[in-house]
Image (cartoon, helix red, strand yellow):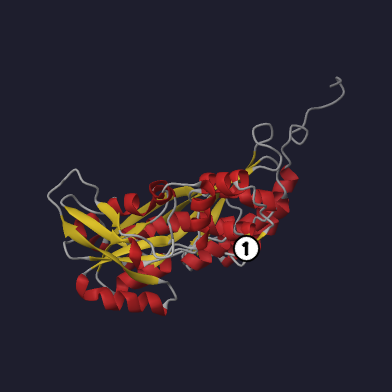
Amino acid sequence: MSESTSATYAAAGVDIEAGDQAVELLKPHAERASRPEVLGGVGGFAGLFSLKLDRWKEPVLASSTDGVGTKIAVAQALDKHDTVGIDLVAMVVDDLVVTGAEPLFLQDYIAVGRVVPEKIAALVAGIAEGCVQAGCALLGGETAEHPGLMGEHDYDISATGVGVVEASEVLGPERVRPGDVVIGMGASGLHSNGYSLARHVLLEIARMPLEGHVEEFGRTLGEEMLEPTRIYAKDCLALAAEADVRTFAHITGGGLEANLARVIPAGLRAELERSTWTPAPVFALIQQRGKVERAEMEKTFNMGVGMVAVVGSEDVDRALAVLTARHVPAWVLGEIRTTEDTEAPRAVLTGDHPRF
C-alpha cells in the first residue's frame, strides 16, 4: 500500500452499504412476523416487546438458544437459503413450548463471510415464515460480516427465543405419573439433527448427487434433505389447552430415548414400542447405504418422531383428536411405568419397526 492510499473498512472486507441494503430487503419479511405487543420497527438498537402482565397472575419467562447445524452445508451446496430459517425457528420455539411456554419473540444472529443482500433476505424470509408458523414475533437480530474468519460464501445462523407461561402451568417431569400415555407426533423428515452423519453416508459414501431424483422420496435428494423442520408450537399449546398434558419432549440431537428421558422423573420409565410407526424412507436409506447400526441411528436421528406428549390416560382420545384436527400425525407410542431400578434408562424402545 502506498502512502497516498488510505485503508478502508470495505477494502478490509466489510461492506457497510451491502449491510444496509440487506436490512432494507429483509424489512418486509420481518414485518410479517409480528404481534400486537411489538413496539417500533426494524432497525433500532434493541427490540421492544410490551408484556401485558394482566394476562398472567404469575408469569414465568422461558428462553432458548439454538442453531441449525450442518444442514446449512446442504443449503449452501444447492444455493437455496429460504428454508433453513424455518429450521432455526423450529429448534428454538419447540424447546420453549416443552415447558408449556407460549413463544413471544425471537431474535436472530447471522454470521457471514461476505454480505450478499439477497442471500440475507432469503435467510430472513425463512426465519419470518417460521415465526409466523410459531405465532411469535421476529423482534430483530444482527448480521455480522467476518472476512478472513469465514469463507466468502459461508454463513451460520442462530437465534434466541423468549416465551411466557403461567407459573402454575409449567410442564415438566414433576407432573408425570405411572399409567400416563406417551403420544408421538410425526416428523416432517430429518428435521435439523444428524446432518453430519447423513451427509457423510449419502454424499460421501453413497456418492449420491443432491440434484438426483430418488424414487423412494419422489423428489431429489436435496429437496428431501432441505425439507423444513415441522414447527409444533401452536399444536402443543392447543393440545395443552384441551387435554391433561403432563409434559412434552422435543426430539432433537440424541434421539427419542435420550430426549424423552430428560422429562421422566426418577422411579418411572417410558416404555415405547417401535411397531407403532414406520420411519420415513430417508432413515432406511441412510441405514442401508452406511450400514449404520440401529442404536447409532436412534441416538442420532429423530427416526420420524419430532415431538412427544405425555398425557393422562383418560385424555388420550381427546389428545389424538386435537392433533388430528390440526393435521399433525399422532399415535400412542407407549406408556409410563414404575421401575425400582434407579440406574436403568428412563426411556426405552422395544420391538421392531414394520417394513424398516
Left or right relative to 228: residue 150: right
**Residue 37: percent from the left, percent from the top?**
46, 65
Q: Is residue 50 visible?
A: no
Q: Is residue 70 above or below residue 118?
A: above
What type is the residue that disc 1 sits on? His
Q: Secondary structure at mark 1?
A: helix
Assess disc 1: are there few (<14), some (14-19) or many (≥20) residues with their C-alpha within 10 Å of its C-alpha: many
Frontmost residue, 174 versus 6: 174
Q: Is residue 286 left or right of residue 17?
A: left
Residue at left offset 68%, top offset 53%: 78
Quarter of the image where the C terminus is located:
bottom left
For the residue pair 102 and 34, the one nearer the viewer reads as: 102
- Picture layout, residue 328 above or below residue 100: below
Q: How many marks?
A: 1
Report the quarter where the N terminus lies. Answer: top right
Q: Which residue is mark 1?
A: 29
Q: Nearer the viewer, residue 354 or 262?
A: 354
